[in-house]
Image (spheres, grey):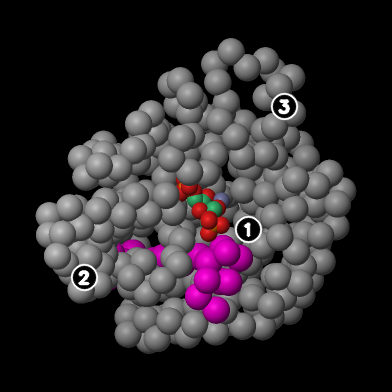
Amino acid sequence: MLVCGNAILQKANQENYGVGAFNFVNYEMLSAIFEAANLKNSPIIVQASEGAIKYMGIDMAVGMVKILANRYPHIPVALHLDHGTSFESCVRAIRAGFTSVMIDASHHPFEENLAETKKVVEVAHIAGVSVEAELGRLMGIEDNISVDEKDACLVNPQEAEEFVKESKVDFLAPAIGTSHGAFKFKGEPKLDFERLQEVKRRTKIPLVLHGASAIPDYVRSSFLNTGGDLKGSKGVPFDFLQEAIKGGINKVNTDTDLRIAFMAEVRRVANEDKTQFDLRKFFAPAKEAMVRVMAERMDILGSSNKI
Ligand code: G3H
Ligand code: 13P
Ligand code: ZN
């Protein structure tokens, strides 16, 4: 059943678990998310970036989600706009049927980010749609980074408190040291859990971890073993994800893991049978690989059997 983001994340916040927010750019990714949720009895957030919306068409993106939500009526699902860059983009998504939107004005100064977020919240809440905003910059932090450098890029907990109070935003993504993509950490993985806990203590709302792909060894190997090149790739370890959930994260944004798992299978089939050109022979195993990754992730995040 299609529900607003709050319906899923308020429960996750009360019961201290994380919900995967999985990106999709086509039918295969989207149906894999629903299949994993069905296997694990897990709520899900399906999210599309502006780029994904442009690729699919907003009517197609919403249409596919509605059809799958009807096919699996017992699964609570929120359709979320990932990294909305403007008020207009958020309104377009709300009008099209999204039940949750992110306004990402985190690259602007605090006051501007706050003003833009407030504007989106006012409209979204009238429509019963939940809103996510971000504070700080997504980037890996290293051991030898100074306190000043950390403060310059990571979330400021005091600002987070003021931001949430003023904007009435539903979820906040605090930058604590993750980054998007396959190369998150140069040295050992490191996240600022203390900062996260302080943000949670001050805001109490569901928090969001961007750049949360883990790139488990079997996913990396499947890509490397089929001739792909992702040497040196590093994700957020599973125990870090669980520590982050303990610290107050409830929405766990995951895209890269699905892309790598999908493309490794496409590559494998292409290598094994050079005469093959039936799309289904590539996409069916690629979809299964994504289902496996997500089903495992739902256990790790604690959302399995939370329907
Ligand atoms: O946050 C980034 C997501 O992985 C979506 O990426 O803009 O390439 O669709 P995209
Ligand atoms: P990953 O690149 O780690 O999958 O993060 C995705 C994300 O944060 C989408 O908003
Ligand atoms: Zn993100």
What mark, if any, has residue 58 been given in the picture?
Answer: none
**Magenta includes 64?**
no
What mark, if any, has residue 277 been given in the picture?
Answer: 2
- Residue 286, horizontal then vertical, whole percent: 25, 61
Q: Which residues are magenta?
A: 36-57
* Residue at 72% from the left image edge and 26% from the top image edge: 151
* Residue at 25% from the left image edge and 67% from the top image edge: 283
Q: Which residue is mark 1?
A: 83
Element type where label 3 sits in the image: helix
Residue contact between numbered discs 1 and 2, judged by CB atoms under 8 Å: no
Q: Name the amino acid type tagged 1.
A: His
Task: Decide if ligand 3 comes within 8 Å of the CB at mark 3.
Answer: no
**Dot 2, how many residues are within 10 Å of its Cα: few (below 14), some (14-19), or many (20+)?**
few
Task: Decide if ligand 1 comes within 8 Å of the CB at mark 1.
Answer: yes
Q: Is residue 232 left or right of residue 155?
A: left
From this view, report whether residue 168 is shown above or below residue 190: below
From this view, report whether residue 252 is shown above or below residue 217: below
- Residue 248, horizontal then vertical, whole percent: 53, 44
Q: Earlier in the sequence, mark 1 or mark 2?
A: 1
From this view, report whether residue 44 is shown above or below residue 210: below
Q: Which residue is mark 3?
A: 151
